[in-house]
Image (tube, rainbow, N blue to C red):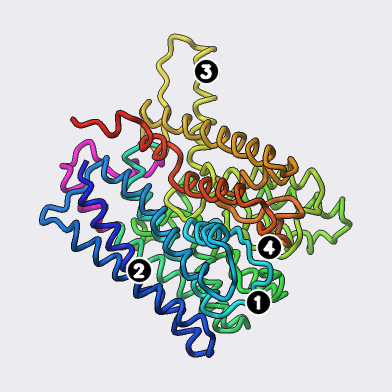
């Protein structure tokens, strides 16, 4: 294990994060808020800490192989969340470190759960810092998915790389080039979203913050009532398109630059869009019948909130915890599904759900025709057994993790709905829960401190896609070869 290379890159990330803290410091300085000195001092300390690590572990032959990649992915989220929490902890918010770590972890993993009771009373520096954490976390997630997860054969992104016929060095160069293209596209989407929101009437500062959290599918808002505060169908429409755009595979954007229409021919994209339409239709009918809302209004309400839940963004325009048991149950299922692989969304992902159905269909066909050789194909590519088993294992781990975390939270004193929705929303990195306490109009501030640490760990585990975490705790991973 080349620990020097891993720590060297983590040092680069920490120093970069320290530099980023000067942006919220500037916002607070302009507005004469005392928090500017907190951001400036923690930024200097973080930058120096990162530089110290870089100087201590720099190596002429910085080498990152498979094992170092997994270790880096695990440690980076923990280090960045811990350091990102410092300005929140030291600021005028008067938070405990537990609350600050929960808020920072929720931000950097793009979950969107919050412990802040009155967001509108916080300084602009805090608001922009929360949005920046989600934006940085979002682009980090995509790059991690492109660079690391294909090694586990569980993301589906390996289908885009012909690693069976290309030399390893050439494959790495392609991944590096692709990562650069994705960062450019991600930044472009953010700028366009901010401009459109400003044109639609959202204040400039709010449009900047919401564009970052929309494209990151994070859901942190600058308002207590989230997007409902603006009460604008145009703003809702822009954010809907932003959430959907961020939920599609960024790797497809990069590969389809000259033919953007080809994205919609992708099986995963078609499955995702069909799932959204079905979900909106069912929830709209439910709202129309149960709450006596006009069908047109129910479509508007369900479109925004359902897409926000499926994409894991977590914005809201209504208190969906009051929609009734049928709608809440459906939202819980959609919360677990998530968006596409290679996007900023969480959840199981559409690709894996599609493979699961293909496996079930294959098993049924084997029973009918036991001697027939059947292969699972996806987008004209054959899915090997290694990929299939990894996907099935991940789906099992996802569901098992929700049950285990919910059991722990229930043991800590939370009611059953709060426990299960908190577990699901943290592991699927969605944001708000489905109960009144942690729903769209509530927050996580009243949960026990132990529960917040459990949920923080769940967010990181959900972001690392489970198998990566299991690999790190396996004794065989640390043995010398």
* In this view, the mark in front (4 or 1): 1
Q: Residues within 10 Å of mark 2 (few under 14, many from 20)?
A: many
Residue 12 included in the magenta stretch of the image: no
Residue corresponding to mark 4: 316
Q: Quadrant of residue 401?
A: top right
**Residues at discs 1 and 3 in contact (Cβ within 8 Å):** no
Residue corresponding to mark 1: 120
Residue corresponding to mark 2: 46
**Residues at discs 1 and 2 in contact (Cβ within 8 Å):** no
Q: Secondary structure at mark 1?
A: helix
Name the residue: 59% across, 70% down: 94
Q: Nearer the viewer, residue 204 or 290?
A: 204
* In this view, the mark in front (1 or 3): 1
* Left or right: 217, with 294 as reference point: left
Q: If you read the primary sequence from the N terminus, does the residue marked by circle 4 or circle 1 appear first?
A: 1
* In this view, the mark in front (4 or 3): 4
């Amino acid at each position: 294990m080349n620990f020097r290379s891993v720590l060297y890159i983590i040092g680069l990330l920490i120093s970069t994060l320290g530099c980023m803290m000067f942006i919220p410091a500037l916002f607070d300085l302009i507005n004469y808020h005392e928090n500017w000195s907190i951001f400036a001092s923690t930024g200097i300390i973080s930058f120096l800490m990162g530089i110290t690590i870089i100087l201590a572990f720099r190596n002429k032959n910085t080498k990152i192989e498979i094992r170092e990649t997994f270790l880096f992915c695990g440690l980076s989220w923990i280090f960045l969340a811990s350091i990102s929490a410092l300005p929140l902890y030291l600021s005028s918010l008067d938070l405990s470190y537990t609350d600050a770590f929960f808020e920072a972890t929720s931000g950097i993993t793009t979950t969107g759960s919050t412990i802040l009771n009155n967001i509108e009373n916080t300084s602009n520096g805090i608001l922009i810092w929360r949005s920046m954490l989600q934006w940085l976390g979002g682009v980090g997630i995509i790059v991690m998915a492109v660079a690391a997860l294909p090694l586990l054969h569980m993301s589906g992104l390996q289908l885009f790389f012909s690693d069976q016929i290309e030399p390893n060095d050439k494959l790495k160069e392609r991944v590096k080039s692709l990562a650069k293209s994705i960062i450019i596209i991600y930044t472009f989407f953010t700028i366009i979203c901010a401009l459109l929101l400003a044109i639609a009437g959202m204040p400039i500062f709010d449009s900047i913050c919401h564009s970052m959290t929309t494209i990151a599918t994070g859901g942190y808002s600058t308002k207590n009532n989230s997007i409902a505060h603006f009460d604008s169908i145009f703003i809702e429409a822009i954010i809907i398109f932003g959430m959907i755009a961020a939920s599609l595979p960024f790797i497809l954007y990069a590969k389809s630059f000259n033919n953007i229409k080809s994205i919609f021919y992708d099986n995963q994209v078609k499955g995702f869009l069909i799932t959204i339409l079905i979900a909106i239709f069912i929830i709209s009918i439910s709202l129309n019948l149960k709450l006596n809302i006009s069908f047109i209004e129910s479509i508007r309400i369900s479109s925004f909130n359902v897409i926000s839940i499926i994409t894991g963004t977590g914005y809201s325009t209504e208190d969906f915890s009051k929609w009734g048991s049928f709608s809440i149950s459906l939202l819980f299922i959609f919360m677990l599904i998530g968006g596409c692989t290679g996007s900023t969304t969480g959840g199981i992902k559409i690709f894996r759900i599609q493979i699961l159905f293909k496996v079930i269909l294959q098993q049924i066909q084997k029973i009918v025709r036991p001697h027939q050789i059947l292969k699972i194909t996806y987008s004209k590519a054959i899915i090997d057994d290694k990929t299939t088993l990894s996907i099935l294992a991940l789906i099992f781990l996802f569901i098992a993790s929700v049950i285990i975390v919910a059991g722990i939270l229930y043991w800590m004193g939370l009611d059953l709905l709060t426990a299960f929705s908190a577990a699901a929303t943290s592991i699927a990195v969605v944001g708000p829960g489905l109960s009144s306490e942690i729903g769209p109009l509530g927050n996580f501030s009243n949960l026990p401190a132990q529960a917040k640490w459990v949920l923080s760990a769940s967010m990181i585990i959900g972001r690392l896609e489970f198998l990566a975490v299991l690999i790190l705790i396996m004794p065989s991973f640390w043995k010398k070869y």
